[in-house]
């Protein structure tokens, strides 16, 4: 999945008030003669003025640190325009937003990490088309592939926000240096390294897929990443769109390839337990044995940089770092699994459209990216903004001409599959279900 990519907060949920619009800057439009410095600070938000005293309610699955950083990125906008933005982070966002739509009690805006779920709600007529300014910002900032993820039948509904590179393997540079390991450049080297570590009596990999109602999504990421490498991007697209069935022999081969690592008792689950312990280990804790030296490698997305304990140095020569999950045949390109977030509106009041327009702009993306822990595929964000080494690595992958990027497959599938039977099926597979039974069950569930 991305998680969705935003299933990584530790708290059950939190509501945060953003940009109350009651500070001096919020009154800058009226007090510009008396407060020229404040007026200058608010000048970038002049085109969003005229909505003082209004409120906009926004929901999503980002919580904790992610929600706090979103607050910071929107604070000046809220202060300068006087728009009060109420953000509610919900660990069960996918289920909640469906219920909101069914009950007719939707928020004004929501941040979606699953285009499949978003398109389900668009099909129900719940989502408003993006206004002209948002569409213009989209064309300025993203390539057509990204815009298509937020579009249906040629109508643009949701502008991209963040992007996450999932094709990464976390490791300890100190452990690699101490034991003479080299970062693998292709799949064969990755397996050779795994075998070398196993031959030394250690288990090279650690993983965790428990995530509350979303348990199983990290295993779907493994499937998607390996599918890009084994089956190729064209077959990947056909699988995600169900042009080929979920239990196609090519997908069975992908599943078994994943199993050669995740269900290999010689390889997992270092520092935690056996193969089945993957299903009960939280995804947040799944990679921590890398830091203690009990585990050598952990495949997880770029956002995992925020899961390491406070004080952990994330750098090429630090406590932990990441390398690109290698291709089977690098000569055929650089497959990369990516995820992202999209902002969609359920109402079209002027103040809602103002917030929507700002959050689709390069200015907002630059503001949020400069805080770290957040990457955008928006080409108006300068690479120099990314001071965090993993953010910079991710942005390099996104901008590499050799990269063959595909969006997280489970996030593109119908919500009942991508955020349902696929998660459940992969969890049961880790617990011992066969490849055939797992894929047949998911195929049978396709709407």
Image: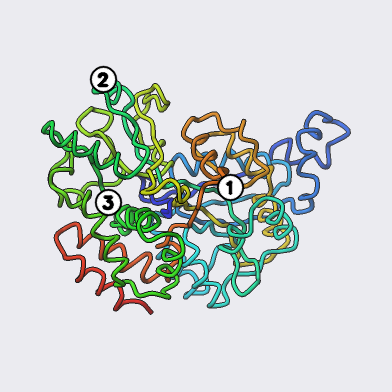
Please report whichever mark, 2 or 1, sits nearer to the chain's N-terminal start: 2
**Tag 3, which secondary structure?**
loop
Q: Which mark is residue 377?
A: 1
**Would residue 33 be seen by someone viewing this image from the given angle?**
yes
* Image location of residue 125, percent across then percent down: 57, 77
Q: Is residue 85 left or right of residue 216?
A: right
Check residue 311 in the rendering and tell me which mark sits there, or answer none.
none
**Residue contact between numbered discs 3 and 1, judged by CB atoms under 8 Å:** no
Give whichever of 109, 124 is nearer the camera: 124
Question: Residue 8: x percent and y percent?
Answer: 38, 47
Real-space Cα separation, disc 2 to disc 1, in angstroms: 36 Å
Quadrant location, the N terminus: bottom left
Q: Are the two marked residues, 2 and 1, in contact with CB atoms closer than 8 angstroms? A: no
| Neighbour tally class for label 2: few under 14, some 14-19, many 20 plus, Cα within 10 Å | few
Look at 64% across and 39% down and name the residue there: 366
Residue 74 or 385: which is nearer the viewer? 385
Instruction: Residue at 54% x, 48% y: name it.
Output: 162
Q: Quadrant of the C terminus?
A: bottom left
Task: Look at mark 2 in the image and give the residue it sits on.
Answer: 178
User: Sequence-wise, which precedes: disc 3 or disc 2?
Assistant: 2
| Residue occupying the far front of the picture | 331
Labels 3, 1: front one = 1
Disc 1 is placed on an element classified as: loop
Sequence-wise, which precedes: disc 3 or disc 1? 3
Density class for disc 1 (Cα within 10 Å; few <14, some 14-19, many ≥20) is many
Residue that label 3 marks: 209
Mark nearest the camera among 2 and 1 is 2
Residue closer to the observer: 151 or 13: 151
Residue at the left extreme? Answer: 201
């Amino acid at each position: 999945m991305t998680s969705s990519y935003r299933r990584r907060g530790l708290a059950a949920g939190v509501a945060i008030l953003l940009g109350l619009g009651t500070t001096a800057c919020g009154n800058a439009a009226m007090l510009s003669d008396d407060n020229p410095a404040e007026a200058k600070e608010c000048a970038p938000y002049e085109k969003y003025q005229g909505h003082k005293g209004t409120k906009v309610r926004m929901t999503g699955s980002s919580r904790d640190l992610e929600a706090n950083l979103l607050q910071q990125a929107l604070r000046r906008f809220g202060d300068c325009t006087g728009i009060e933005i109420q953000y509610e982070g919900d660990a069960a966002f996918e289920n909640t937003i469906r219920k909101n739509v069914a009950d007719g009690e939707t928020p004004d805006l929501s941040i979606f990490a699953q285009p499949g779920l978003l398109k389900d709600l668009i099909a129900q007529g719940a989502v408003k088309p993006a206004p002209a300014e948002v569409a213009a910002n989209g064309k300025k900032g993203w390539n057509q592939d990204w815009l298509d993820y937020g579009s249906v039948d040629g109508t643009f509904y949701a502008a991209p926000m963040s992007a996450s590179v999932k094709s990464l393997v976390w490791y300890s540079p100190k452990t690699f240096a101490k034991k003479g390991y080299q970062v693998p450049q292709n799949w064969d080297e990755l397996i050779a390294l795994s075998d070398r570590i196993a031959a030394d009596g250690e288990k090279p990999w650690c993983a965790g897929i428990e995530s509350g109602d979303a348990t199983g999504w990290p295993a779907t990421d493994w499937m998607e990443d390996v599918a890009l490498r084994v089956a190729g991007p064209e077959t990947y697209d056909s699988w995600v769109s169900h042009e080929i069935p979920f239990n196609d022999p090519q997908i069975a081969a992908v599943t078994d390839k994943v199993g050669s690592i995740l269900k290999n008792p010689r390889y997992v689950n270092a520092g935690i337990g056996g193969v089945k312990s993957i299903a009960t280990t939280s995804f947040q804790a799944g990679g921590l044995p890398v830091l203690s030296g009990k585990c050598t490698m952990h495949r997880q997305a770029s956002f995992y940089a925020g899961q390491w304990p406070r004080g952990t140095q994330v750098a090429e020569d630090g406590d932990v770092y990441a390398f690109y999950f290698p291709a089977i045949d690098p000569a055929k390109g650089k497959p990369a699994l990516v995820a992202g977030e999209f902002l969609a509106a359920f109402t079209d009041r002027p103040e809602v459209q103002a917030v929507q327009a700002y959050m689709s702009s390069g200015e907002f993306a630059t503001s949020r990216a400069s805080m770290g822990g957040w990457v955008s595929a928006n080409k108006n964000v300068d690479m120099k903004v990314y001071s965090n080494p993993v953010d910079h690595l991710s942005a390099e992958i996104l901008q590499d001409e050799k990269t063959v990027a595909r969006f997280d497959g489970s996030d593109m599938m119908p919500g009942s599959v991508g955020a349902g039977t696929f998660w459940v099926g992969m969890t049961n597979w880790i617990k011992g279900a066969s490849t055939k039974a797992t894929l047949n069950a998911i195929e049978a569930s396709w709407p």
